[in-house]
Amino acid sequence: MTQPLTQADIIAMVEQKLQDRPKIVDMFKRCYQNTLETTIRRQEDGTVFMLTGDIPAMWLRDSVNQLRPYLIPAGQDSDLRAVIEGVLAAQYRNILRDPYANAFNEFDNFHGHHTDLTEMSGWIWERKYEVDSLCYPIQLAYLYWKNTGETRHFTEEFKQAAKLILQTWRIEQHHDEQSKYTFVRENGGETNTLPGKTGYTGMTWSGFRPSDDACKYGYLVPSNMFAVVVLGYLLEINELAYQDGELEQETRSLRQEIEQGIREFALIQDEEFGPVYAYEVDGLGGVHLMDDANVPSLLSLPYLDYCGKEDPVYLNTRRMILSKRNPYYYEGEYAKGIGSPHTPENYIWHIALSIQGITATEEAEKQEILGMFERTDAGTGLVHEGFHKDNPDEYTREWFSWSNAMFVEFVLSLCGLEIKRG
């Protein structure tokens, strides 16, 4: 068995393998240190609150992605393990407080979006219901086990949170009939307005995308695909830690129903690209063909462990969303890639570039994306949310920890350093 790598080992490997790209190496080191130095707040009860960056709140989604690059050295670093286990404990607790919330406060202080018309508490920063927010903590718990061998984080509280996730996804399979979730942001516009009616598909409903923008149609396909993946992880976790027959049966049946719904409603025959995946559907005939920079996305499916990089339908979908058929794909003087309705038109996201690089099979494409990073950091040595395709000095979010971590993971993948997934 090989000796686990330290953070110093990883930095040295990147310096050696990318010695011909000194700016990339410098950006990697700055981004790699940024999360640990700026976003972690240890609590007296052993939990860890993790800032998303320039917003003083902890997102379930962001906090997982911020930690993913540290799973590789965590096996021999007790302090990293304490941070990851502390974040996991905070995530379980927050899910049990409210599975419909996407972002939480450090304390019971009523900070955040408390003028929204929905059921808020002092712990909640924002209560936008997003399927992926419930996927990510299961993913982190699973990957932490696979990369370190640790199992003590599979607590009774994790099991309670997992059962609540299953219950929530069950209810949201029948959103119009069974769900009590509501959300209104006064004068919030289309991106803060819940989608309309849906028909039953087997998939589970999501009010919002991982961008925190409202879905156009209620079944967000990449998030349902992510749910299929983490339900598979949960089956493994249950077998290891709980041997709960009822939990196994419910997890397995829900996973099968969501997967069947994807096959029946989200697989579309496109005249130009052949069979592709839709981004959203409503179960009533509504189909939305696009992709968004935020993960889960259609571009990220191999990264999420839903399919392989060479999967034929994925490759068709990839060609479609990396073309003008995707209304949020932009090509400019400095870069080309996927943006989001969350940011202005013609703004490309660094997260999407990282995902494109990680999921690429051709070395030329990976090197082209590295060049885009070199040209679009606006002299900061860090990466951002969105930047203008023709002027990277115009960008959103000076400090966006998820984006920095995603870039780190792309660079690690170039150096052959992959997070274990099984």
Image (tube, grey):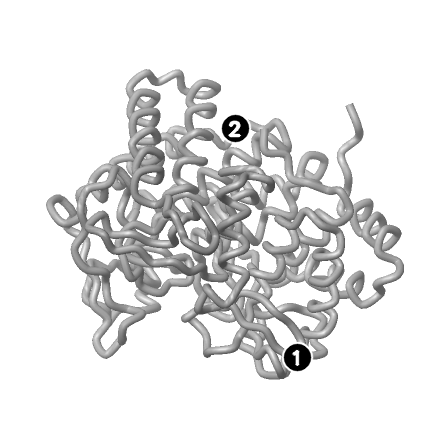
Horizontal relation, residue 129 to residue 291: left or right? left
Q: Circle 1 sits on which residue?
A: 333
Work out whether 114 lies above or below 46.
below
Kind of element beneath mark 2:
loop
Count of marks, rendered view: 2
Q: Can you give x and y, in whole percent of width and height, for residue 165 in the image?
A: 31, 39
Task: Judge whether residue 30 can be spotted in this image.
Answer: yes
Q: CA distance from mark 2 to mark 1?
A: 50 Å
Residue lying farthest to the front in this orientation: 271
Task: Judge left or right: residue 346 versus residue 377.
Answer: left
267 sits to left or right of 333:
left
Q: Which residue is mark 2?
A: 152
Mark 2 vs mark 1: in front: 1
Quarter of the figure with the C terminus: top right
Q: Is residue 320 above or below residue 260?
A: below
Quick check: can you spot residue 165?
no
Q: Please name whichever residue, 245 or 360, is drawn nearer the observer in this view of the structure.
A: 360
Task: Decide if residue 362 is on the left or right side of residue 19.
Answer: left
Up-down relation of residue 296 to residue 369 (above or below) = above
Residue kind at label 1, given as amino acid type = Glu
Quadrant, the N terminus = top right
Q: Secondary structure at mark 1?
A: loop
Q: Quadrant of residue 101?
A: bottom left
Please state the horizontal and vertical placement of residue 143, each as a whole percent of the image: 56, 36
Find residue 262 and report its horizontal and vertical position in percent.
34, 40
Q: Who's the residue at 41% across and 57% down the image?
A: 210
Mark 2 or mark 1: which comes first in sequence?
2
Label 2 neighbourhood size at 10 Å, few (<14), some (14-19), many (20+)?
Answer: few
Camera-side residue of 346 and 244: 346
Residue kind at label 2, given as amino acid type: Arg
How many other residues sit within 10 Å of disc 1, few (<14), some (14-19) or many (≥20)?
Answer: few
